[in-house]
Image (tube, rainbow, N blue to C red):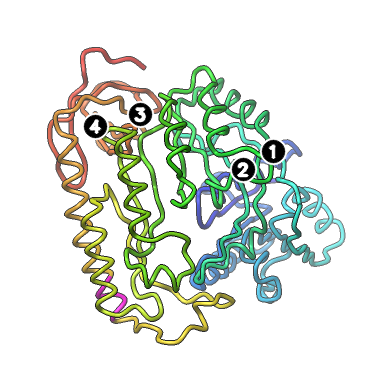
Amino acid sequence: MKVRFLTLGCKVNQYETEAMRERLEGRGFAAAGDNEPADVLIVNSCTVTAQSDQKARQALRRLKRQNPDAVTVLTGCWPQAFPHEAEKLMEADIILGNSKRGELADRIMEYLSTKQRIVDVAPRTKGEPFEPMSVRGLSGHTRAFLKIEDGCERYCAYCIIPYARGHVRSKPMGDIRAEVAGLSERGYKEVVLTGINLPAYGQDLGITLCDAVEAACSVEGISRVRLGSLEPERLTPEVIERMKRQDKLCPQFHLSLQSGCDATLRRMHRHYTSAEYMRIVEELRAAFPNCAVTTDVMTGFPGETEGEFMESLDFCKRVGFAKVHVFAYSRRPGTVADRAPDQVSNAVKERRSRVLSEAMEASRLSFLRSQVGRTEQVLIEREAGPGIWEGLTANYTPVQVEAPGELGGQMMRVRIKEVRDNCCFGEKSLDFHG
């Protein structure tokens, strides 16, 4: 049988889709080609915003129209967080919560046998184990994502994810080493450690994220280990000091900020102040020369005044981020913030997003210009044009270089010469090696 996946949301979802795909292949299923009808359609959903839920509905309905005889499956965070809402989507023949993914092949066969709709979403429970899961790679990517942590216990005022993902669970260290070794054997040079609340890794095992980093870095053949999005408050001086000893750890840290205003951070139920955040940034920059600090910033959180927005804007300018993902607050039913007073109008949120984005583009340009003159190892990811290859440095700077041949997935030393169109351009260094 032919299967087609559609993945919505984060890198963790991408990893989980790949794991489901490989499990199905082991049971005799095969991936449907781009122009080939599918027998089974699977939507791995996200539920970060109400718009995410709507995207899942629209996607499943569209796929069903295109493949009317196919078995349709809805899984992921939306049915886990809102099972009763997801159950109303009658285009879904099978609805599985996150904890039921391992039963996917059996449930498909059950549906084919009985033609009876299946809805199975078990509530999250404290103490549930980390779901055994591994991948051989990630289709279409030169970097391999590796999920090592699941769950979150922070309960930020705007976020539904703790309800979809449950309590913190961590991948055992031996499993991390084995999976990274397998990825290395298949030619991957960089692995990205991901999780729902990555810095919480190990709190259920009596270890820390540093242990996972060291395990991944110890694998021969892996040149780089990169960290996914990080909540900042667990990056203590001791953690930073321990991580800096790992030469393979990429000096790029995506520290989720959300707001540079302390009053807004308190309403968000974030667990740090702007001063504490700045201290962490300074310590990272001292430990990792030429590191890139990137972030997410929200505008228009309930109660955000113009003065609070300007405080957040000023803080972001002072940090000097390498890149910022700016987004307007989106109401998420089921969260504290959705019921909060003083909701900000869409027009105000959009205006503030534009102002912040423009300021952060200037910060981005300043960072890229600071890379000119440096010679860096670039992991080539794709051909950007005839004979023009694009990749990323260890600190996540995008670099394009003119070079002959098929270079995807290879490492190249590049001297950065200039910045154009939000990208660095350089020339191949003489000591190129793949």
- The quadrant in which the C terminus is found is top left
Asked whether residue 367 is in view, the answer is: yes
Q: Earlier in the sequence, mark 1 or mark 3?
A: 1
> Looking at the image, which is closer to me, 396 or 404?
396
Which residue was labeled with disc 3? 379
Answer with mark 1 or mark 2, whichever residue precedes in sequence. Answer: 1
Most distant residue in the right direction: 114
> Which residue is label 4 attached to?
388
Which circle's residue, 1 or 4, is located before the other in the chain?
1
Q: Quadrant of residue 391?
A: top left
Q: Report crowding for label 2: few under 14, some 14 to 19, many 20 or more residues within 10 A (C-alpha).
A: some
Residue 102 in picture, x, y percent from top left: 75, 48
Query: Which quarter of the image is occupied by the N terminus?
Result: top right
Compared to residue 388, the image places residue 5 above or below, namely below
In the rendered image, residue 70, in percent from the top left (x then y), is placed at 68, 58
Asked whether disc 1 touches disc 2, contact meaning CB atoms under 8 Å apart, the reply is: yes
In the rendered structure, are the residues bearing label 4 and label 2 in contact, judged by CB atoms less than 8 Å apart? no
Element at label 1: helix
Q: As shown in the figure, which amino acid type bears the numbered disc 3?
A: Leu
Give the SS element for disc 3: strand
Can the viewer see residue 55 in this picture?
A: no
Residue type highlighted by circle 1: Glu
Residue 253 is one of the magenta-drawn residues: no
Say which mark, if any, is on residue 25: 1
* Label 3 vs 2, first from the N-terminus: 2
Examine the rendered structure and indicate whether residue 255 appears above or below residue 396.
below
Q: Residue at x 48, y 23 (%)?
A: 222
Position of residue 332 in the picture relative to residue 90 (left or right):
left
Q: Amino acid at mark 2?
A: Ala
- Disc 1 from disc 4: Cα separation: 35 Å
Residue at (43, 70) in percent of width and height:
266
